[in-house]
Image: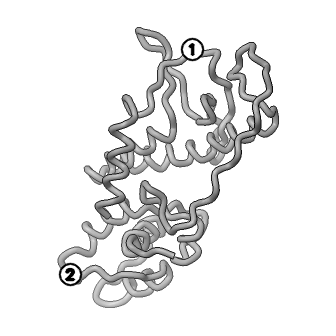
Amino acid sequence: MGILLLLTLVCLVSSPAYGRTRISPDETTEIAVEIGRKVISAQCFEEEAGTVRERKRGFVFLSFRKSFRKQTKLFRRTGSSRAKKKRNRFRRLMRAGNAACAALQDDSGQDNGGGENNTPTPTPTPEPAPTGYFTDNGDVTDLGKSVFEIPQSIAANAMAGEIVYNRNCTGCHEKRSRPTMPLLRLVISQAPMYYDEQVLPDQDIADLTAYLNVFRTP
């Protein structure tokens, strides 16, 4: 767990102002990001999705990815429901936005950022999918979800799971390792806990499953 936290902190500290990069507006390309039933206007800059804001000294680009990491850190420190909600929103924006930026690259074969430089550039080689159970910021990968039996539609995170564990499990028993999500749901629904979905919804169970498996490797 300490390694995951250290990696998260390093990413946050090394990114100026959590993803704010000074730019010229014509360096970005506008995209539409669909989140549920909402369509949100965003910008692509250097293959990342985010927003552009005007400041006194010019324009800055705010990356969804780094905003997500900021909210993850805040949620881990405070346990705030508002921080959790913002973290989950930025996670959805990051994934949908970055996919839209990648599709823009694939469709055009170039990334001129809305400017006049039309020189074709090679299509970027997609990064290989993570081969472990967790990403550096504690998210469970598709492989991890398959092994831990977490639905692919749920974005489970080990750091969020630690907060769930500390709130509901500490003091009653020692940490148990290697459960699957269905097994964990079954165990906590029985005596003496009787935790149903009203007490711990599937999102909390998924995060808790991630935390209890955090040291597992393929």
Residue occupied by mark 2: 172
Crowdedness of circle 2 by 10 Å Cα count: few (<14), some, many (20+)? few
The residue positioned 57% from the left and 66% from the top of the image is 131
The residue positioned 39% from the left and 87% from the top of the image is 187
Residue 51 seen by the camera: yes
Residue 42 seen by the camera: no
**Image x and y of residue 81, in percent:** 35, 51
Q: Specify the amino acid type for callout 1.
A: Ser
The residue positioned 30% from the left and 83% from the top of the image is 193
**Image x and y of residue 184, in percent:** 42, 82
Residue 61 placement, left or right of 85: right
Viewer-side residue, 167 vs 44 = 44
Q: Quadrant of the N terminus?
A: bottom left
Look at the picture and state if 113 lies above or below 136. above
Place residue 194 in its image quadrant.
Answer: bottom left
The residue positioned 56% from the left and 43% from the top of the image is 94
Residue 18 placement, left or right of 46: left
**Image x and y of residue 111, in percent:** 72, 28
Q: Nearer the viewer, mark 1 or mark 2?
A: 1
Look at the picture and state if 122 lies above or below 184. above
Viewer-side residue, 193 vs 140 = 140
Disc 1 and disc 2 in contact, CB within 8 angstroms: no
Residue occupied by mark 1: 24
Q: CA distance from mark 1 to mark 2?
A: 56 Å
Sequence-wise first label, 1 or 2:
1
Crowdedness of circle 1 by 10 Å Cα count: few (<14), some, many (20+)? few
Total marks placed: 2
Q: Specify the amino acid type for callout 2.
A: Cys
Name, please, the residue furthest toward the left. 171
Q: Secondary structure at mark 1?
A: loop
**Image x and y of residue 208, in percent:** 39, 70
